[in-house]
Amino acid sequence: MTTLTDTLAAIVGPAHVLTGADLDSYEQDWRGRVRGRALCVVRPASADEVARVVRACAAAGTSLVPQGGNTGLVAGSTPDDTGTQVVLSLRRMNAVRSIDPQNMTFTVEAGCILQTLQQVADEAGFLFPLSLGAEGSCTIGGNLATNAGGTQVLRYGNARELCLGLEVVTAQGELWDGLSGLRKDNTGYDLRDLFIGSEGTLGIITAATLKLHPRPAAQLTAWVALASLEDATALLGLAHQHLAAGLTGFEVMNQFALGLVDRHYPQLRVPMWREHAWCVLIELSDNESEDHARAQFERLLETAFEQGLAADAIVAESLKQAHDLWHIRESITLAQAEEGVNVKHDISIPVSRIPDFVREADAALAAGVPGVRFVNFGHLGDGNLHYNIQAPADGDARAFVAAHESTISTIVYDTVSRFGGSISAEHGVGELKREKLPHHKSPVALQLMQAIKQALDPQQLLNPGRVLARTP
């Protein structure tokens, strides 16, 4: 009798259907929060093979879990614990199919590592600006499936804004070729935007046509120390005035977050964190010259000091120094993991309301769950905070999180809602936020989402139980 794994092996080759001990890294999420159990992992090498795999699983009534680099933070790409799901790994599909310099696009497969695409764009004389901490291992398919953000959203937008077209395998195993490089195509529903951000629940992204941007003539980075979050938001307003469209990134980090980096990675030499409650990283990309960029930066900082917003500042004197400053910011998540299990919140709030939100949420958590430590950092420029909670310094962090995570997240998300925000800015919903979503999304929105899922995936084959609860 032919089994499903036999059928899959005939499609992709026996070496690319993994079982047993080979499944380990595919069954564990990056944060170590969730471990599942898969029937197998299948690794197709082409969109045609993906379509055939999906058809085989549909015929067997077996659900699939699409997976890229498995770097997600909401357990959205790991199998459940039934041992019946197939993990569909896109990592072998890593070709850059074409580069169109005149159209300023390139078409790439879903398994391409983000950092590799940045390098390919640079070698072609362009910039691909999507940038985030996991860029050395995350894949562009996963970035699009979660509509990833990162550090340059302020100027270039989320992954959605960087994508012009997709190739997608549907839940029925059909291949939709929407790899248009068109910037204008008003011919009905925008299917591209439907699949971007859907976390593999509506279709499997196999390739994308992405925008390229001109490389800036100069990039400058400044590290600025401030006394309060109110000063940080005021400085952001000044940065918009002085740097205009050149303002590329504006990252905020609280003292405790930087202290964790200093404790666990002392070789990084975190500046100014002991003396100041907050620090920000500002990046300017200038299309004219380094002299022009530096003059803009100097005027911004002079005004910030005159208005009492900045307490101290460093302007990077070299690309290496700028890289070192960004490396500190990107090491906060790793330092948190070294410190112990924590509760993450990827939220967005209108920028003008962020100081009041943090003040209210801090107070509510301190009263409701005494001893928590606040790791607050993120993309202030676009209103996206990573408002994370570390367990008390003494005691069992894992036990503390197990006992208090639900209470902590309820307090945070209820406060987010009161301030008109979102409980997921860029990480997605996955499994970890699925049960919270109905409390913070309107019933009409949820009904529309369920209707779309039912229309595109009536068998609930694609990543079931992620974003939306399974329906009977």
Image (spheres, grey):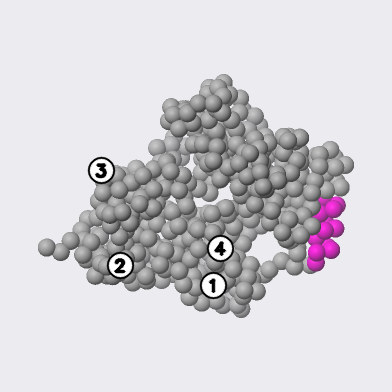
Q: Which residues are magenta?
A: 289-300
| Crowd around label 2: few <14 · some 14–19 · many ≥20 (10 Å) | few
Residue corresponding to mark 1: 106
Towards the viewer: 20 or 107: 20
Q: Position of residue 383 (x, y in %)?
A: 62, 44
Label 3 secondary element: loop
Task: Name the N-terminal-most of marks 3 and 1.
Answer: 1
Horizontal side of 363 relative to 460 (left or right) equals right
Task: Name the N-terminal-most of marks 1 and 4.
Answer: 1
Residue corresponding to mark 3: 472
Q: Nearer the viewer, mark 3 or mark 1?
A: 1
Residue corresponding to mark 2: 15
Horizontal side of 321 relative to 127 (left or right) equals right
Label 1 secondary element: strand
* Residue 19 sits in quarter: bottom left
Residue corresponding to mark 4: 115
Q: Position of residue 28 (x, y in %)?
A: 39, 48
Q: In 3D space, how far apart are the residues under numbered discs 1 and 4 (Cα atoms)? A: 15 Å
